[in-house]
Structure formats: C-alpha cells, structure tokens
Image (cartoon, rainbow, N blue to C red):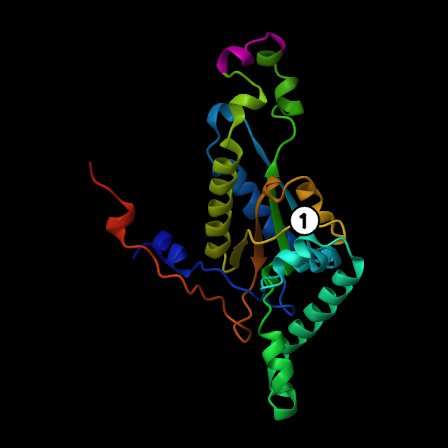
C-alpha cells in the first residue's frame, strides 16, 4: 500500500478533537500553503476563499456548533425567531457536551432520563476543531494581484475567460472540494486528523462570525474542515447509511 493510499484510508470524519494537544500554527500554515500551491485552478481563477479560525476563536466555533444540531426539532430551531429557544439550545448543547466528555459520571440510574433526552440530540462537535477552515465563494473573482498584472491591464483576461457571475456556476464548489481534500491529505500525512462538516443552518439568534456568510443562504458556505488530533476516547462518528457498491457508481462505457 502506498503512502497516499494509507493517508486516504486513515482519513475519516471524527467528532471530537483533543483539547490537550493542539497543532502548532506554523504546521497548519505549511499545510494550507502547500494545498494552495497543489490545488488545480482553471486559468488560475480562484472562485472560492478560505477563512481559518484558530484556537483563539473557540467562542465563535461554539456558537457555530449550535447551528449543527441534529434532532427532530432541527427545523423548529432553523425557523425560530425566539431568542429563548436558542438559550435553551445552548443549555442542551452544554449538557450534551458534558455528557460526552464525562460519560462515567452519568452511568448512575438517576441519570437515565437525562441520558435518553440527550441522546435525542447530536451536534457536529468537529466545528470546534483547533483549526477550522471555512470554504465560501469569493464575492469578486479577480484578486488584486491579477488586477495589477500586465495581462489584465492590457485587457487580455476577458479573452481567456468571460468573467461574470453567470459563467462562474458551481466552479467554486469544485475548486473548494479539491482544495479541501488535498488539505486533508497533507494534514493526515503530517500525523493530524481532518474532519468535514456541511450540516449547519443560519439563524440570526446564533451569534457566530463563522456563520455570517450563510446569512442569506446556508449554501453560501460549501463546508468546513477541522484540523487537529482525534480524541479517540470520545464518541466516534458513524454513518448508518451503507456505501453504494462500485458497480452502482462507476460505469464503464
């Protein structure tokens, strides 16, 4: 098995990152800069951008995590205009978090109802990774570097690519996905873990700078990518949906 295959096999979505072991910022910078260089971009146009939230922005990540709630009540929170609902949601999250961090203290029979109630909820805790990369569409396609180039000043860029919103389409999602998987592979190669998240919604009562780009549409954020070290002692991510077979997806013509 090649090193690349090993990295691809090792990478899997996780829920909890270690809080006692945080990667150095220089290592994260090295990984992201390499991904920037290695990711292919058609005509060198960058349709996406990445915001990096480090360990100092944990409060922002905490409130963004509230928007990842998965339960039968998810739609109620999504549509709610009542700030009290989100105070309640925050209380539920804090209890849920404490439960998954300290399960042993909740084993007593007196907590049986609390365990049942908390298991009705799930939060994508990977949003609180030490480093969280948030992928979104660039509001303007051309960068300042490109605008200052002689190629642009001579008016040649339009002949290469018709630069307007109608032609951009889903290119930003394609590029963001490529950058995300390359970043995750480089991180795994350095001994880190990487976890993607797309389960979130926007509500004005969730006060997180991370979610501001989802204000008009949650799809304005393609996904987030958390980087850090997996906490193997906490809850593990499991998908209950079986994988499709090779033959169902790949068609030889």
Residue 224 visible, this angle: yes
Residue at 79 percent of width and 58 percent of height: 83
Residue lying farthest right? 83
Q: Quadrant of residue 229?
A: bottom right
Residue under pointer 1: 202
Q: Residue furthest bottom?
A: 109
Q: For the C terminus, which image quadrant? A: top left
- Helix or strand or loop: what does disc 1 sit on? loop
Q: Quarter of the image holding residue 127?
A: bottom right
Q: Position of residue 65 (x, y in %)?
A: 66, 59
The quadrant in which the N terminus is found is bottom left
33 over 197 or under it: above or below: above
10 Å neighbourhood of mark 1: few (<14), some, or many (≥20)?
many
Name which residue lies at 67% across and 76% down: 98
The answer to whether 44 appears left or right of 82 in the picture is left
Q: Is residue 9 above or below residue 88?
A: above
Relative placement, left or right, of 219 versus 215 is left
x%, y% of residue 156?
55, 10
Compare residues 139 and 182 and report the one nearer the observer. Answer: 139
Q: Nearer the viewer, residue 228 or 73?
A: 73
Query: Please, which residue is most extreme toward the top here?
Result: 154
Place of residue 200 in the rendered image (x, y in percent of width and height, measured from the top left): 61, 53
Choose between 184 and 207: the one closer to the eye: 207
Q: Residue furthest left?
A: 253
The image shows residue 4, relative to residue 107, as above or below, that is above
Q: Residue at x 42, y 65 (%)?
A: 240
Q: Main secondary structure of the magenta part?
A: helix
- Across and down, in percent, residue 81 comes to 76, 53
Question: Disc count in the image?
Answer: 1
Magenta residue check for 2: no
The segment highlighted magenta reads: 153-160
């Amino acid at each position: 098995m090649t090193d690349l295959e090993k990295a691809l096999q090792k990478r899997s979505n996780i829920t909890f990152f270690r809080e006692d072991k945080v990667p150095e910022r220089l290592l994260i910078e090295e990984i992201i800069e390499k991904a920037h260089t290695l990711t292919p971009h058609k005509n060198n146009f960058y349709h996406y951008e990445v915001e990096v939230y480090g360990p100092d922005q944990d409060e922002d990540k905490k409130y963004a995590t509230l928007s990842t709630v998965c339960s039968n009540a998810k739609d109620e929170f999504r549509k709610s205009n009542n700030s009290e609902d989100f105070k309640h949601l925050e209380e539920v999250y804090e209890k849920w978090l404490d439960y998954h961090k300290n399960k042993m203290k909740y084993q007593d029979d007196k907590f049986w109802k609390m365990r049942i109630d908390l298991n009705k909820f799930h939060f994508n805790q990977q949003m609180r990774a030490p480093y969280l990369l948030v992928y979104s569409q660039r509001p303007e396609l051309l960068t300042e570097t490109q605008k200052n180039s002689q190629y642009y000043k001579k008016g040649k860029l339009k002949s290469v690519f018709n630069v307007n919103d109608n032609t951009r389409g889903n290119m930003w999602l394609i590029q963001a996905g490529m950058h995300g998987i390359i970043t995750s592979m480089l991180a795994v190669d350095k001994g880190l873990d990487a976890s993607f998240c797309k389960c979130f919604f926007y509500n004005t009562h969730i006060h997180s700078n991370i979610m501001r780009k989802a204000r008009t549409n949650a799809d304005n954020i393609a996904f987030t990518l958390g980087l850090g070290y997996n906490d193997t002692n906490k809850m593990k991510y499991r998908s209950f949906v079986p994988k499709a077979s090779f033959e169902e997806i790949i068609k030889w013509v």
